[in-house]
Structures are given as structure tokens and as C-alpha cells.
């Protein structure tokens, strides 16, 4: 029983030590982000590569998701005679609920795989 308590105490100490190291890493990264030299050209290149070049993929995916949501809403709205509200319903549901989640997933998939491939071919 006592050895079990010692093990649990040791694990909690290790967890706190790792948490402290992660906090120090975060503070170090934050400090280095605000100290010169700043590499503006690299930052702008990454913004263009990750953000601007992903707009086409995001637009196409958003369009098709919007069409599927509209198709699903149509069956329900016909029952209540409010098909005229379908545009508002689809727009609100995409902007509030699905838009941020799908944007994040698609952006991570597209940009993450591109960055991973770029790192993978470095020698």
C-alpha cells in the first residue's frame, strides 16, 4: 500500500516537472517572438503559403458542404412551408457552426501536409 502511494507521488511529481518545463518552453518562445531580429520576408511567405494558397481549397469545400447542408435542410423546411428561409438557415449554420471547424480541419490538412512534405525533402 505504501509503495503504491510512493509511485503515485512520484508520477505526480514527474507530471508537475513536465508541466513546468512546458511552461518555461512557452515563455521562452513568447520572449523570442518579441525580440529582434525579425524575419518579415519569411513571415509574409508563410502567410501567403498557408493562408492565401488555401483559399481555393477552402472555397470549394465550403461550397460543397453548403450544398449538402441545403439538401438536408430542404426536406425539413418543406414540411413546415418555410423553404424561403433555407438560405438564411444554411448561411447561419455554416458561419456559426460548421465554418470554423471545417476551415481549421481543411487548413491543417492542406498546409500541414505541405509543410511536412517540405521538411521531409530537406537534406
Image (cartoon, rainbow, N blue to C red):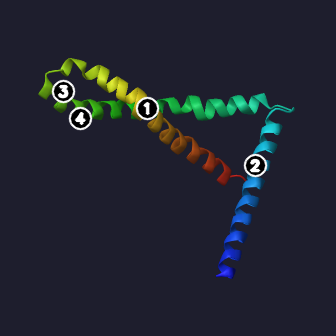
Q: Which residue is mark 3?
A: 77
Sequence-wise, the earlier of marks 3 and 2 is 2
**Marked residue nearer the N-terminal end (4 or 1):** 4
Q: Label 3 to label 2, Cα distance in Å?
A: 51 Å
Question: At numbered mark 1, what does the secondary structure look like: helix, strand or loop?
Answer: helix
Query: In the rendered structure, are the residues bearing label 2 and label 1 in contact, judged by CB atoms less than 8 Å apart?
Result: no
Q: Please, what secondary structure does the residue beneath circle 3 have? A: helix
Residues under labels 2 and 1: Cα distance?
Answer: 32 Å
Q: Is residue 3 above or below residue 84?
A: below
The residue that appears at 51% across and 38% down in the rendered structure is 104
- The residue positioned 51% from the left and 45% from the top of the image is 109
Q: Earlier in the sequence, mark 4 or mark 3?
A: 4
Q: Which mark is residue 99?
A: 1
Write down the residue under mark 4. 72
Q: Which-is-in-front pick, marks 3 and 2?
A: 2
Residue at which label 2 appears? 23
Q: Identify the residue shown where x is 24% and y is 19%.
A: 85
Amino acid at each position: 500500500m505504501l509503495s503504491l502511494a510512493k509511485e503515485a507521488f512520484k508520477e505526480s511529481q514527474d507530471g508537475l516537472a513536465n508541466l513546468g518545463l512546458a511552461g518555461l518552453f512557452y515563455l521562452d518562445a513568447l520572449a523570442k517572438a518579441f525580440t529582434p531580429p525579425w524575419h518579415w520576408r519569411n513571415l509574409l511567405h508563410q502567410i501567403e503559403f498557408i493562408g492565401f494558397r488555401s483559399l481555393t481549397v477552402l472555397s470549394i469545400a465550403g461550397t460543397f458542404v453548403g450544398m449538402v447542408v441545403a439538401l438536408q435542410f430542404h426536406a425539413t423546411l418543406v414540411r413546415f412551408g418555410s423553404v424561403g428561409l433555407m438560405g438564411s438557415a444554411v448561411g447561419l449554420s455554416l458561419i456559426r457552426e460548421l465554418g470554423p471547424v471545417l476551415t481549421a480541419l481543411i487548413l491543417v490538412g492542406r498546409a500541414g501536409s505541405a509543410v511536412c512534405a517540405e521538411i521531409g525533402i530537406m537534406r
